[in-house]
Image: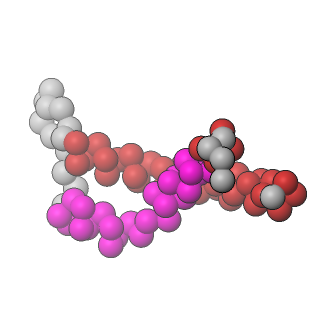
Amino acid sequence: MAFTLYSLLQAALLCVNAIAVLHEERFHKNLAGGADQGIGGFREEPGIKSQLMNLIRSVGTVMRVPLIIINSIAIVLLLLFG
């Protein structure tokens, strides 16, 4: 299997799929310790854990519907061109 642009895009698509299908209550409870740590004081930078939680929550919320379309296109391309 050659390392092509398509295989790189396919690997990125699989990673985004993995983030999008994470179960909100189970995974977020284990990672965040059960509490939302995204709320800080004035001029306090959020920690890496809360930034990661916000990224995972955002990808799960925003990318669910577009991923259905993108996955369908990837499957059709794979079936047509092998």
Q: Nearer the viewer, residue 31 or 61?
A: 31
For this orientation, the residue located farthest to the right is: 80
Q: Is residue 74 visible?
A: yes
For this orientation, the residue located farthest to the bottom is: 26
**Residue 13 shown in magenta:** yes
Residue 48, image quadrant: top left
**Residue 47 shown in magenta:** no
Q: Is residue 69 visible?
A: no
Q: Which residues are magenta?
A: 10-34
Q: How many marks?
A: 0
Q: Is residue 81 above or below residue 48?
A: below
Left or right, 75 with respect to 33, comes to right
Residue, x 42% and y 69% (percent of image)?
A: 23
For this orientation, the residue located farthest to the front is: 1
Residue, x 20% and y 38% (percent of image)?
A: 46
Q: Nearer the viewer, residue 2 or 52?
A: 2
Give the image location of residue 36, x and y in percent: 22, 56
Give the image location of residue 80, x and y in percent: 87, 57
Residue, x 25% and y 67% (percent of image)?
A: 29
Q: Nearer the viewer, residue 2 or 77?
A: 2
Residue, x 46% and y 57% (percent of image)?
A: 19
Task: Specify the principal SS of the magenta part.
Answer: helix
Left or right, 77 with respect to 42, comes to right
Q: Nearer the viewer, residue 27 or 11?
A: 11
Left or right, 39 with respect to 70, comes to left
Give the image location of residue 8, x and y in percent: 59, 44
Left or right, 61 with respect to 45, comes to right
